[in-house]
Amino acid sequence: MYSTEGFVIKEIDHGEADCFFTVFTKDFGKIRVLGKGIRKIKAKLRGGLQIFNHIYLEFIQGKYFFTATEAVCKDAFSLIKSDSEKLKAVYFVCDILERLIREEKDERIWLLILRIFKKIENPEFIGKKLELLVYYFEWSLFDILGYHPELYKCVNCRERLKEGDLFFSVINGGILCSQCKNKDRGAISISVDNLKVLRLILGRKKEILQKLKISEKNSQLELITRYYVGSILEDRTNLI
């Protein structure tokens, strides 16, 4: 018998009444547990073991997988589940966790998830602030996983970055200066403002989420982030 607390980040129906849940736990990292009969109306696990809940969980080791025996809801994040914009954001956060995290236990990831869920729940984070919050989560997770990009020196010539055109190289994990941009023809142009955003996020400044601003839908930062996610996912898949 094991016990811990965790966040339910994914659920998949199994058979007539069972369900598999992916839970990122405080003590065991990402695990997959079976909720037996949970889709029945009177199932005892039904109240706690639900997608996006912060739960207290007890489970046992079976022959092939873990099976949940107790699940008590610590926080159901009702505001998130009643707001389509916030719900979309937390779906996205959990999808990133499911794709990038293996089974490793890491207290920093646990604390990041705890903080992000509470921030998304906060009524203050809507619109552009919510969009920025998701970027904060993604780049903070990249950093924890060991994919901290070089944002102060050119990744090729190693000279400190100066004024001029700058490019984010996904394959090299950082910024190329204008003189070295041909070293990666797939490098993406990055503005000075977006470079500052990434530096502030990864600098872990206090109250960073209150200070950062983005004025409009940021297609450049979105493109860089999506390509970087793909690169990290490919790298972590190759390590298995």
Image: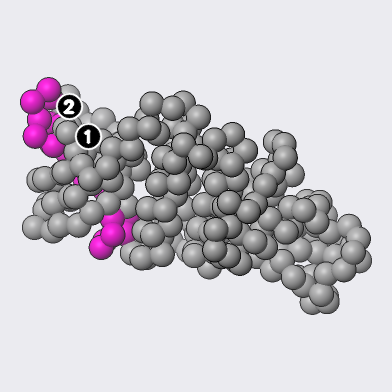
Residue 102: mark in rendering? none
The main secondary structure of the magenta stretch is loop
Answer with left or right where residue 87 lies relative to residue 166: left
Looking at the rendering, the stretch of residues picked out in magenta corresponds to 25-45
Does the magenta portion include 211? Answer: no
* Residue type, numbered disc 2: Arg
Residue underneath mark 2: 39
Q: Position of residue 53 (x, y in %)?
A: 29, 40
* Residue type, numbered disc 1: Cys
Residue 73 found in image quarter:
top left
Residue 215 found in image quarter:
top right
CA–CA distance between discs 2 and 1?
A: 7 Å
Residue closer to the observer: 198 or 208: 208
Q: Quadrant of the C terminus?
A: bottom left
Q: Position of residue 37 (x, y in %)?
A: 12, 31
Q: Residue at x 38, y 26 (%)?
A: 82
Q: In the rendered image of this protein, does residue 227 appear above or below residue 36? A: below
